[in-house]
Amino acid sequence: MEQYAVTREQVLAALCAGLEPLPYTHAMWEGGAVSWGRLDAWSDIDVQVDADDERVEEALAEVDRALESVSGIDLKFRMPDDPAGNYIQAFYRLRNASPYLLVDVAVMRHGATSKFLEPEIHGPPVFYFDKSGVSELPHFDLAAWQASHLGEWLANMQIRFEIFQVMVLKELNRANLVEAVGYYHAYTLRPLVSVLNMRYRPARHGFSTRYVYYELPPEAMVRLEPLFLPASLADLRAKQAEAQEWFRQVAAEIAPAVAGGDFQSGS
């Protein structure tokens, strides 16, 4: 693999050096692959910074300066602001680092109601500094979430699934492969992955396909992977039918536990 002048360690050191001395920053930590022990040559850098509510823009400007000092910024993309107002976020591609070493920085408002720190969902974060006890991690109460949300979630998922399968079928009948595949991914595979996530990793039920190779059983992945690769209209029709049957099977398997309030991960 090609060697680059700037390493992950240098980027993190520059961010830490630039942000920690500021009086309005409270903490900086890393999540993503490092939280799960899965760092490899293709891992990006997922950094979160906790800053005073009214100074998050200043903190993000300091991120710009730190990255310019260590490598130079090739491209920057500022995400639309979080509707809940908890954070601002930007992605950076660095000039002298691997293109895979994207830097994903979210600056959290200190008073934010959620900072994506629940280890049951996001894995154990790696803190680089903490001045205000941010690293006292919140607990995600899976049982309480299931009791209050899971029944409605499953019922809505089942209704949406059943009502929208016709979108795939009508484009198959018209021999419109591109449109059929688009609807198939949106209305058949996405719900299927959702119920599989709920079946095997309920705390991360909303992660879609992220981490499926690590967290779904191998036998599920052997069956799931080919469903993503239809070769023709006829093959797509067969795969849609199989995915539809599988969705209904998994939904039926978890329904009694949902109703009884004793749903368990991987049961």
Image: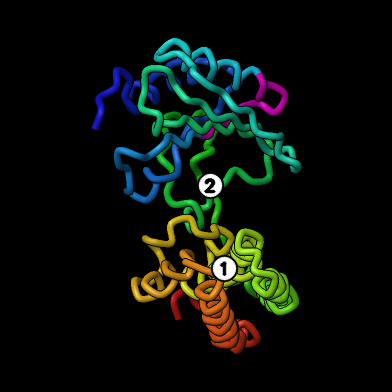
The label on residue 51 is none
Does residue 153 appear in this view?
yes
Which residue in the protein does label 2 denote? 117
* Residue 223: percent from left, percent from top: 41, 75
The secondary structure type at the circle numbered 1 is helix
Residue at point 46% right, 35% down?
A: 29
159 is higher (above) or lower (below) than 89 = below
Q: Residues within 10 Å of mark 1 (few under 14, many from 20)?
A: many
Residue at point 66% right, 61% down?
A: 179
* Residue 120: percent from left, percent from top: 48, 58
Q: Residues within 10 Å of mark 2 (few under 14, many from 20)?
A: many
* Residue 45: percent from left, percent from top: 43, 34
Looking at this view, name the residue that lies furthest to the top.
69
The secondary structure type at the circle numbered 2 is loop
Type of amino acid at the residue the image marks with label 2: Leu
Which residue in the protein does label 1 denote? 189
